[in-house]
Amino acid sequence: MYKLGCFKVVRASSQVDPVPDTPWAPQAWIAQAPQPIGGGGPGRLEGLVFAVKDNIDVAGLATTAGCAAFAFQPATHAAVVQRLLDAGARAVGKTNLDQFACGLNGTRSPYGVVPNAFNPAYVSGGSSSGSAYVVATGQVNFSLGTDTAGSGRVPAGLNNIVGIKPSKGLISARGVVPAAQSVDCVSIFARTVALAARVLDAARGYDAADPYSRDLKLATQPLPPEFCFGVPAPLEFHGDAFAEAAFRDAVKRLRQLGGKPVTIDYRPLAGAAGLLYESALVAERYAALRDFFDAHESAVIEPVRGIIASGRQYSAADLFDAQTRLRAIAQQAAPMWDSIDVLMVPTAPTQYTIARMLVEPVQLNRNLGVYTNFVNLLDYAAIAVPSAIRADGLPFGITLVGPCGSDWQLADLGQRYHHATGLTQGATGTALPPMEPIAGLQAAAVVKVAVVGAHLTGMPLNGQLTARDAILVGRTETAPDYRLYALPGTMPPKPGLLRVARGTGSRIALEVWEIPVEHYGSFVSLIPEPLGIGTLALDDGSSVQGFVCEPFALEGARDISEFGGWRAYTASLHPA
């Protein structure tokens, strides 16, 4: 049998709940292929291996949907699997899930409970639990999940990985066991946004054989450098102070990337979310499995059985009533997009231990989906990205939500956000690689320029950058070959950066901005002497264009290199 790496469980902190003495094990895999499936030939995904949630067909491996009595041998690959194989990737196995993709926690499977990749006492999130776990622990490059109510996002948020929930119909669902077919989406997990976006580009495409496939035209321009993002009110974290603090930090980080927070009324979105299980819309889950369920109801585990069975009680008239209510809510929510470019929500408002989830499986599962359930119902796109490792050692993630067709824009902002966190990849401890252009976005010609003083974020001259559509792409330090001086008599106050003999200087903090080529000349024309643009050596060995100072101007200037940067120096002048 083709062996994937051993399960790697990372114990993050002594402050988290201890692992109980129970038979729970990392049952992330349902089946592994004897040999990788697909030739791994030339293509944009050449050399990559992936796992497939076991409600998606892979020829040669049984599709169980987490229920042995339901299992069958598909003769062909699901359309999305075939597209990925054609792009050069290889499939290596099927992953565990909440049975029939009905759940958000990863405990609802006869094949075992899938634990959190950071602490096995906690839930992994579901229903795509196994697919998230094998990505977070580095066993595959990426994986496929599905998302009806958040199953492609909650596991990403709880395991420090990326989860793309594409616009409905962008990826064919032919060959996927339906949960609620009109809102189902195939989702993608990866440890970086760039790879997830590359997989999306390979997987997407109209499929006339899928009744819900759409030939969507995606936005090809990134969000503006200064954008507005929605923050829901009221916010609910179910008493989880760690999550609440992490979300406050997330708002600050998105502001640093050029965003302006706008409070939005969350009640219409919450109303849509409530319809998913508390109205006749749940009848679609029963309709998806009606023939099997009526004949083999006892083979379905609780609480999945009860949820599916509840769909029997509704009439066609009830369903039309529920659909009309959903349309009314959609109309009520639509004006939100007049004031924001993107909505930011916690991917999950809290985390639960497996023990607690098994005691309260319905209510706690509902809590995990409070910020996810509405997205597909209202025809939005979304991407879940890591945000922080909480004070208790568990991951916290945020989700960026946009209108249908905003997939590339969300990926672009999501990548910038992810890299701004400084987090490592999943539970592997591996540093994030450099950012990559997002497939599908039309890249504008830009120049990177490093700033060390009055042009830093929040400083007096930063507006000279933002007015020219410049975008902050990173914060780093110079090589230890520079001295920083406070220039006397400059308004607003400015520093001068001077290169000295290798290794005899200090590392100086800086920001790297991308400015469109057409605006670069007008920006440089504003730079007063004795400052200018030169080539700066960075601490990682690379180089970038940035601000330097002519040596003659530094006579009598104060050497402030000991502060490590202009921001720290100016803060020292005005202590709290």
Image: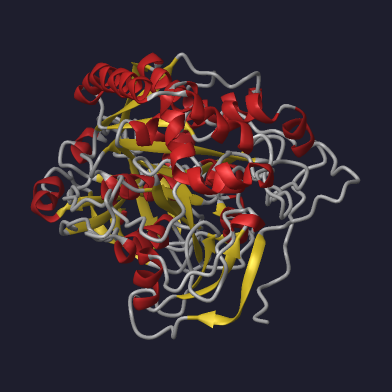
**Quadrant location of residue 276?**
top left
Residue 47: give x, y in percent of width and height.
46, 80
Which residue is at the front of the view, 419 or 73?
73
Instruction: Tell me: 549 left or right of 303.
Output: left
Q: Which residue reaches farthest right?
A: 21
Question: Taking the image as drawn, is residue 505 in sight?
Answer: yes
Q: Nearer the viewer, residue 328 or 459?
A: 328
Q: How many circles with numbers are drawn on the protein? A: 0
| Quarter the N terminus occupies | bottom right
- Locate residue 159 relative to residue 213 in the image: left or right: right
Left or right: 231 in relation to 303: left
Residue drawn at x 23%, y 19% is: 331
**Residue sitting at 85 percent across and 40 percent down?**
18
Q: Position of residue 112 (x, y in %)?
A: 74, 52
Indicate the position of residue 84 as horizontal and vertical percent values.
Answer: 38, 70
- Decide which of 213, 369 is in the foreground and name it: 213
Residue 444: % across, % down: 16, 56
